């Protein structure tokens, strides 16, 4: 099991993002526990770079995003942001740069042609909650909690809102956004923010196991299906069905569909070609 640094802090001994490969699963670990894994400029860039590297690596069939320390992610690095209040424009250009960079990184998770699973061991607040919502699947410790508390400090969680409102019903999303109150893992599962709640300390292994389960499927089929899932969700019902029919037709022409259907009929395990 090799561990490499996808991004580093000022000290070469302090990697911001740890990247390790377990079988065909890449595990990306936020590694700023003292800062509650807040999304600094370097953290956002490091995570985005790691995702870009994984995108074209055919040996990787799934991704787990985890974190070290008691907190999963406390959102944006407010000290870093506030440090730019002294800029000539009171920080406007820097704030826009960070928000757009973070939004691009979140979209890179959604557009990644491999399944991503969040492994949440503690609090996931603001952009940290957004990170969980941006992943395809999420496993959380029973000790985890989720919140979009920006309203408490005069900064509405507008970018986290985008991912949150695409995961949970509107009334539940608005309650989280307007009150800022945290919800426990069990409630997060009830409203659809996460998939599974597991005993504390087992969330990382459970997330890896879930990713490995998906990794057994045809990588081509998973890529096609993931892209189609997010695209059709933004369409009208008629357009979604029209588009999905096109995707199904394309999928039926794939070697893996031919093999998978044949294996089903012949009652044997399929051998995927990933095409």
Image: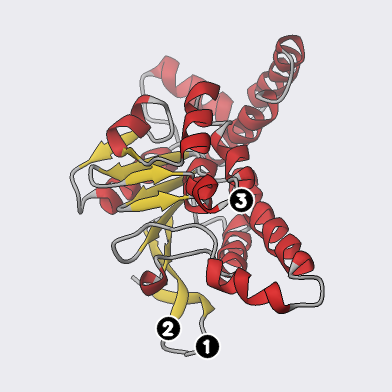
> Is residue 275 at all visible to an observer of this figure?
no
Distance between mark 3 and mark 1 Cα atoms: 24 Å
> Is residue 179 at all visible to an observer of this figure?
yes
Mark earlier in primary sequence (3, 1): 1
- Looking at the image, which residue is at 62% across and 76% down? 83
Query: Neighbour class for label 3 at 10 Å: few (<14), some, many (≥20)?
Result: many
Task: Report the disc number at residue 161.
Answer: none
Q: Nearer the viewer, residue 12 or 171?
A: 171
- Looking at the image, which residue is at 53% across and 49% down? 150
Quarter that holds the C terminus: top right
| Residue labelled with disc 3 | 106
To which quarter of the image does residue 71 belong?
A: bottom left
- Looking at the image, which residue is at 56% across and 55% down? 58
Q: Position of residue 30 (x, y in %)?
A: 43, 65
Distance between mark 2 and mark 3 Cα atoms: 24 Å
SS type, badge 1: loop
Colouring: secondary structure
SS type, badge 3: helix
Q: Is residue 74 above or below residue 215?
A: below
Distance between mark 1 and mark 2 Cα atoms: 8 Å
| Residue labelled with disc 2 | 14
Query: Neighbour class for label 2 at 10 Å: few (<14), some, many (≥20)?
Result: some
Mark earlier in primary sequence (2, 3): 2
To which quarter of the image does residue 70 belong?
A: bottom left
Count up the numbered dots: 3
For the residues labelled 1 and 2, say whether their Cβ atoms are less than 8 Å apart: yes
Task: Report the disc number at residue 10.
Answer: 1
- Looking at the image, which residue is at 30% across and 66% down? 69
To which quarter of the image does residue 19 belong?
A: bottom left
Q: Nearer the viewer, residue 20 or 250?
A: 20
């Amino acid at each position: 099991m090799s561990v490499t640094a996808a991004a580093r802090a000022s000290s070469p001994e302090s990697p911001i993002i740890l990247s390790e490969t377990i079988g065909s699963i890449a595990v990306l670990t936020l590694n700023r526990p003292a800062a509650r894994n807040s999304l600094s400029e370097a953290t956002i860039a490091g995570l985005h770079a790691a995702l870009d590297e994984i995108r074209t690596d055919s040996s990787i069939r799934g991704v787990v995003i985890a974190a070290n320390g008691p907190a999963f992610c406390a959102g944006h690095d407010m000290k870093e942001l506030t440090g730019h209040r002294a800029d000539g424009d009171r920080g406007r250009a820097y704030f826009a740069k960070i928000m757009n960079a973070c939004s691009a990184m979140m979209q890179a998770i959604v557009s990644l042609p491999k399944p991503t699973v969040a492994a949440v061991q503690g609090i996931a607040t603001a952009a940290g909650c957004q990170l969980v919502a941006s992943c395809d699947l999420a496993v959380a410790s029973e000790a985890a909690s989720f919140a979009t508390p920006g309203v408490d400090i005069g900064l509405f969680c507008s970018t986290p809102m985008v991912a949150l409102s695409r995961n949970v019903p509107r009334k539940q999303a608005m309650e989280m956004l307007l009150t800022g109150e945290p919800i426990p893992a069990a409630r997060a599962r009830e409203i659809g923010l996460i998939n599974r709640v597991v005993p504390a300390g087992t969330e990382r292994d459970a997330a890896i196991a879930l990713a490995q389960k998906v990794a057994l499927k045809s990588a081509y089929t998973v890529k096609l299906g993931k892209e189609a899932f997010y695209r059709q969700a933004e369409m009208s019902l008629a357009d979604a069905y029209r588009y999905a029919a096109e995707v199904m037709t394309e999928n039926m022409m794939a070697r893996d569909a031919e093999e998978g259907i044949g294996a089903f009929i012949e009652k044997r395990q399929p051998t995927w070609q990933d095409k």
